[in-house]
Image (cartoon, grey):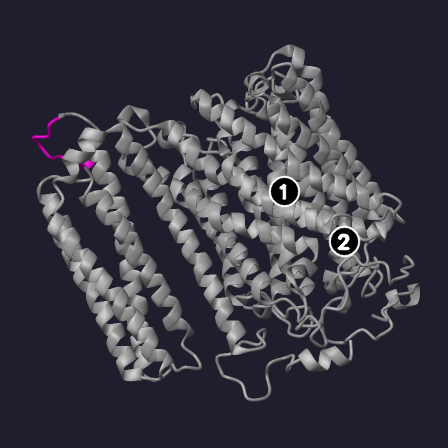
Amino acid sequence: MSTTTEVLHQDPHGHGGEHDPHQQHHFTTMEQQFDTSKIGMWLFLATEVLTFGGLFAGFGLMQSKYPMEFIEAHEKLKRWAGATNTVVLLVSSFTAVMAVLMARTNQAKKCAMYLWLTVGCAGIFMCIKAYEYTHDFEEGLYPAKYYSHVGDLIPGSHGYATFFSFYFMMTGLHGLHVLIGMGLMSWLAIRASRGEFSDKYYTPVDLIALFWHLVDLIWIYLFPLYYLIT
Amino acid sequence: MEHTLTSGSVLGDRPRPVKNYLNETTGIKSWLTTVDHKRIGIMYLCAVCTAFLLGGIFALLVRLSLLNPQHTLFGKQWVTAEMYNRFFTLHGAIMVFLFIIPAIPASLANFVLPMMLGAKDVAFPRINLMSFYLWCIGAVMAIGSMVIGAVDTGWTFYTPYSTTTDGAVGLMTMAVFILGFSSIFTGLNFIATVHKLRAPGMGWFDMPLFVWGIYATGVIQILATPVLAITLVLLLIERVFQIGIFDSRIGGDPVLFQHFFWFYSHPAVYIMILPGMAIISEIIPTFSRKTIFGYRAIAYSSVSLALLSFIVWGHHLFVAGESDLANVVFSALTFLVAIPSGVKMFNWLTTMYKGNISFETPMLYAMSFLFLFAIGGLTGIFFSTLAVDIHLTDTYFVVAHFHYVMMGGTVIAFLGGLHYWWPKMTGRMYSEKWGRIATALVFIGFNMTFGSQFIMGGQGMPRRYFNYLDQFQPIHAFSTYGSWVLGSGLFMTAIYLLASLKTGPLAPDNPWGGTTMEWESSSPPVVHNFEEQPVFEHEPYDYRHRTVTHV
């Protein structure tokens, strides 16, 4: 362990030299640290996909059990609201990408602006969702045993309540993700306006934008599943 | 490469550093807020061993309940059916979720995996600490559920019983949900560590096989655990709001729960066994002083076991109303599991062939593993055979098979790994004499306890039953006596290991002549693991250039 060590060996304890203050002691370079964080985020996103995957599988099974009820129930949802929300979220994914671009090109003000725009889109999404929920509740379209809508074509079937149970569980869990995303984006925007991100360090912006794309993507699957089934 | 070790150099040709990870900082706070993977590993080790003790006490109570069909002790009935149901539920839930799943990855692997890669820490040290605290919260909730209302569903929480029974099922499932996240964070950390923190020059096929095993485990932890999490949430919502997803009275499907549950829990048994196999792949070459046979085959077999684990869950539902086609497909897929398992077994045996074998405690455990896992694995094939499965399902044969794999496999490997790395972790040697005696007791007691259950199961004794026919009494009693031998062996192990902390001789850096990187650090290691960044210079298990004389 002599000659090779000196060549490859770069500052074993990571405390001296010209170091980015963000660099943690067990990483040799900032690139290594960034790549590691990114792998971590992708792995976390994999767990998210599997979590929602369980719900999608359950929905699929129940749909095959109650095909008529599910088709009838989906017509009670407001298609225009779902479509608008899809557009809103797609726009928010674009603004999230722009925020990353601005961070890595040292444009702190614009980065913060795009982050706030993303938060704004997410806010519009939640407002529309809240309007939809309120409307559903007025019609008695509650989940599970609270379902009290009258005038269904197959009276007494559990299928309607099951549809709305899954609808509220899946859009609810997705909505929770949107709220968490809004919190994270606001936190990033404040940090960005303080000029904390630059081409040397923009890991949080990059990772949270990745998370946001997944939240968007899940909605891209939820929208046809609930609003467009035939 | 001029690394020729002699017995002198094995004992350490450099002075022991005064400061190491144990004494660099002191005080309770320095431990509770540490982000050092070694300290977190040690805290996890203490925690899972406590869970093992608790789960073990319930196991002894289960066996004691079944000592005779009248459930009497000294002429008086001491246990009711409800108490018995709670005993086996708590034994199962504690052992599975609090002990076996985190046992090897979160404690031993947490300690040695970064060192095997020549890294200073895991990729995300704070997430590592968070994983430990999530485990603690989950443990408190699981044990709390036992105090406030007990759970009698078995560790599988099958619906509709679990959605309708009283008791603290809700709290218990929440506990398992949180423990799941603790496990996910451990797996996530290890995968990122393996990808990005290998020593300079170390490629994928230069890693020790332990790392391959833990990597494969991490993949399962990441991909399977979220499904369990959402299943338990659905179970909880079903209990509270009656959605009608699992309970057939309100339009649900109980078999769906079984599908969901086993989609996680079958891969989960590989979360339990793969790290055990990973330890065996380290111990056998070290104590045979021979290069491992079939390095790539063992590495690939770990990964293929991880992938196969996701497509065999249906074999838990052969008698639960699955279609015939699905049964045949799952049966065929399940047979495939025997291939990578066999690859490992034969490669370990071939490694030992013409090796220079010595029989210290870790090696005795490794050989116990080979013997017990062979039985556990082969009896698994009985269950993938559809016709035989129908006879054996829900009998003690299942219990025996499961314990031969989980206890005879994972726990024995855990004990082997604990003894193997004990000198590295604590800087002390344990008593070899007591180690060998305890291994013998554990081996004999284990076979008494569970070997007898194969016979009972074959004769039709159903599992989980409180009452049984008089004809099974002698064999139930024999199994119970076996549990006492097993328990005393484990108790003895705890005593001499703890005693070694005070009285054991100081451990050399490389007491066994191991070839992987963790042995290049001092015993116990310094805070940053190595005095200087180690560089990959020779393959793991490369004994060709070494003349290692044993200590």
Within the magenta stretch, is there residue B31?
Answer: no
Secondary structure at numbered mark 1: helix
Quarter holding the N terminus of chain B? Answer: bottom right
Quarter holding the C terminus of chain B? Answer: bottom right
Where does label 1 land, which residue? B273
Q: Could you tell whether A217 is left or right of B369 in the image?
A: left
To which quarter of the image does residue B349 belong? top right
| The magenta segment | A145-153
Amino acid carrying mark 1 in the image: Ile
Chain containing the residue with disc 2: B
Whether residue B484 is visible: no
Residue B420: mark: 2
Residue B46: mark: none
Q: Residues within 10 Å of mark 1 (few under 14, many from 20)?
A: many
Mark nearer the viewer, 2 or 1: 1
Residue A172 vs A19, above or below: the answer is: above
Amino acid carrying mark 2 in the image: Tyr
Chain containing the residue with disc 1: B
Horizontal and vertical percent for residue B284? 79, 48
Q: Nearer the viewer, residue B424 or B373?
A: B373
Horizontal and vertical percent for residue A76? 12, 41
Q: Could you tell whether A42 is left or right of B414 in the image?
A: left
State the predominant SS element of the stretch in magenta.
Answer: loop
